Image: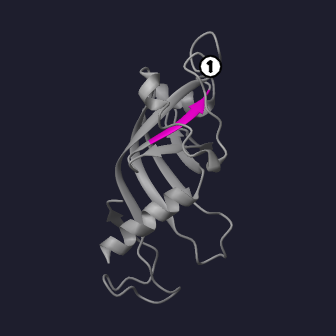
């Protein structure tokens, strides 16, 4: 089952272009923000933001975050997602990272130069390295799952 769930996690990440970042400020006030992403090996997730955005300011003081990739267009009760814990940072070595970001052109991103992502321009490249990946244990609504006997939503660790 875990091989199937790992394949599902890869499929979800590959089929979507936005990841929701869940950050918190120094006082713990939460903030969630979707960003266009590209990934490297399902572990490192890259995006472009201004250091002045709420999520970037939050990450500057508290680099730990939660992330979720999901398709919001599916029928209620049929959704799946990939949930991750990660640590983020601003990318300083842009050349290798720009070999990953923005990903395949069919995803809609546009290539960026190191100059565009450096001072005095307002944008920077960020990367979050996922520590773990989880998906919901698959089951019909209201029916216990066979591996755990649980009839509520619960997550299973996977390695995509």
Q: Nearer the viewer, residue 56 or 91?
A: 91
Residue 10: percent from left, percent from top: 44, 61
* Quarter holding residue 147: bottom left
**Magenta region: which residues?**
45-49
**By what rule are the colours in the image chosen?**
one colour
How far across and down, in percent of the image, does residue 146 sit? 34, 88
Q: Relative to 2, is 28 on the left or the right?
A: right
How many marks on residues?
1
Q: Quadrant of the C terminus?
A: bottom left
Closer to us: 125 or 114: 114
Q: Is residue 46 magenta?
A: yes
Q: Residue at 52% x, 32% y: name it.
A: 25
Q: Quadrant of residue 119?
A: top right
Asked if residue 38 is positioned above or below residue 115 in the image, the reply reads: below
Residue 59 spot, x, y in % from top left: 48, 31
For disc 1, the marked residue is 116
Q: Is residue 145 magenta?
A: no
């Amino acid at each position: 089952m875990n091989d199937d769930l790992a394949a599902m996690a890869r499929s979800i990440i590959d089929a979507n272009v936005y990841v929701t970042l869940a950050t918190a400020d120094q006082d713990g006030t939460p903030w969630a923000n979707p960003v266009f992403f590209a990934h490297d090996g399902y572990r490192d997730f890259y995006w472009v933001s201004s250091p002045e955005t709420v999520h970037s300011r939050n990450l500057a003081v508290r680099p730990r975050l939660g992330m979720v990739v999901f398709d919001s267009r599916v029928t209620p009760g049929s959704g799946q997602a990939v949930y991750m814990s990660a640590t983020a940072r601003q990318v300083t070595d842009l050349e290798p990272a720009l070999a990953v970001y923005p990903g395949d052109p069919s995803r809609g991103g546009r290539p960026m130069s190191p100059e565009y992502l450096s001072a005095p321009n307002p944008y920077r490249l960020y990367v979050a390295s996922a520590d773990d990946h989880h998906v919901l244990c698959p089951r019909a609504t209201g029916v216990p799952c066979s591996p755990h006997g649980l009839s509520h939503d619960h997550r299973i660790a996977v390695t995509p």
